[in-house]
Amino acid sequence: YITNNLSSQANDLRMTGEETISSVEVAKSQFDEGRYSECLGTLTDMSNNSALNIKIQLNMVLCSYLKKGSEHDLEWLLDNLYTIEGKMNKDSEEEEVDEVEKAVLLYNIALVHFQTKNFDKAVVILEKLFKLIEPLEECLVYKICFLLVECYLSTYQTEGAAIVVYYLDKQMAAKSSDSEIHKARMHQYKTRLFAQQKCLKACKREIKNVLSVSGTTASSLFLKSEFEYLRNNFKKSCKLLNSAPKSCPSKEHIPTLYYNNFGCMHFKMKKYNLGVLYLSQALEANTKAVKAAPPGCNSTMYSINHHYQILYNYGIVLLHAGQPKAAFNCLSQAATVYSRNPRLWLRIAECSIGVVKQSQENEQIQNCKSSTVKAIVGSGIYRKTILNTKLPKSS
């Protein structure tokens, strides 16, 4: 996910001699091949070049985070990226040029925010980059657009996602040389967008495109299962979920998604207690997946973590299952991530009303019991309850 700016450094260094150009090319090759420790060494040797010191620092930070056995986490990475941004702001004079020059840095900051589920902060940065997208490298343009669409879809902002998808569609139509990976990804984004917009005809068309390009992968079968779920065809949706492969190239934890989707399906069938059961299993599976993430793979741990998404679903099902207090606890935690979702706040309000209503009902039952029972005498097997001979009119 994390990108570097070594390719742009090669252009900046054309006036500084063949030796420096060669070093940049070697460093870029090492980074692309995943040899981050070697790349860090090459960059350290180049760090004496003051003209490129800031850009070299950026790449050194990325390599330090990505190298094997690194103890640095995403919080450390984010702190260092913001430190570098502060240095770049001091050195720059023209704001417009500055934003273009530090596009790679801003993209990486947005990516870290996305990985840590701070979608709002990521969207603010990516929307700024989207306005300055024309002069950027094509590879970086695609990364910015794909990440922005992902953020919009993750926070159910379909209007924003539709604008970016339309832009990408135009770009790909103008260039027939785009890779199959980009095309497959676009079809998946369109499917998810149309599903959120409840445009079932368009969604069905895009699912066919996804299956023709990607084949019967876990992600394509899950998308098709969601389409059948939206059509209330639960039997077929269950069949598709059960037929999905148990592993996924994107490192997604399939059991987590499986239980979550089954919980949503039983909620739609109004089998709320079964929905609660499946979603509790989804939370357990998610916790196990996060704990089982390999050490040093901090970004992998965040990417497979669907805790807040499951909590949102869990809270909704608990509310319908007559447990508003438990639902309130789940939804209030989910609000830290999905604060822009108006339905979430509506459900939290329903939970609050439900809790008050339950407490009032319990109080009425207690009052009714106290007016019915006159006294209790004796103990143990000789304990007796004496009832009032005249009950109050309210009972």
Image (cartoon, grey):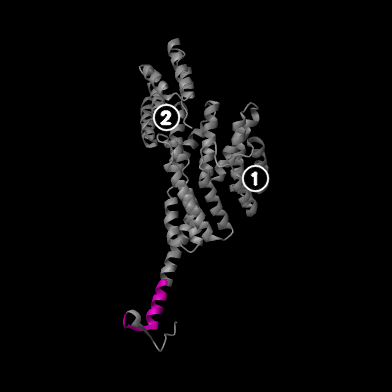
Mark 2 — residue? 66
**Amino acid on which the number 2 mark rests in the picture:** Leu
Mark 1 — residue? 203
Which residue occupies the foreground of this view, 3 or 235?
235
Q: Secondary structure at mark 2?
A: helix
Q: Main secondary structure of the magenta part?
A: helix
Residue at (56% x, 52% y) in the render: 262
Residue at (63% x, 36% y) in the render: 214
Q: Which mark is residue 13?
A: none
Residue 368 among magenta residues: yes
Residue at (67% x, 37% y) in the render: 212
Residue 36's place in the image compared with 356, above or below, is above
Q: Quadrant of residue 43?
A: top left
Left or right of 69? Residue 168 is right
**Amino acid on which the number 1 mark rests in the picture:** Cys
Q: Position of residue 91 (x, y in %)?
A: 37, 25
| Earlier residue among tags 1 and 2 | 2
Left or right of 379? Residue 95 is right
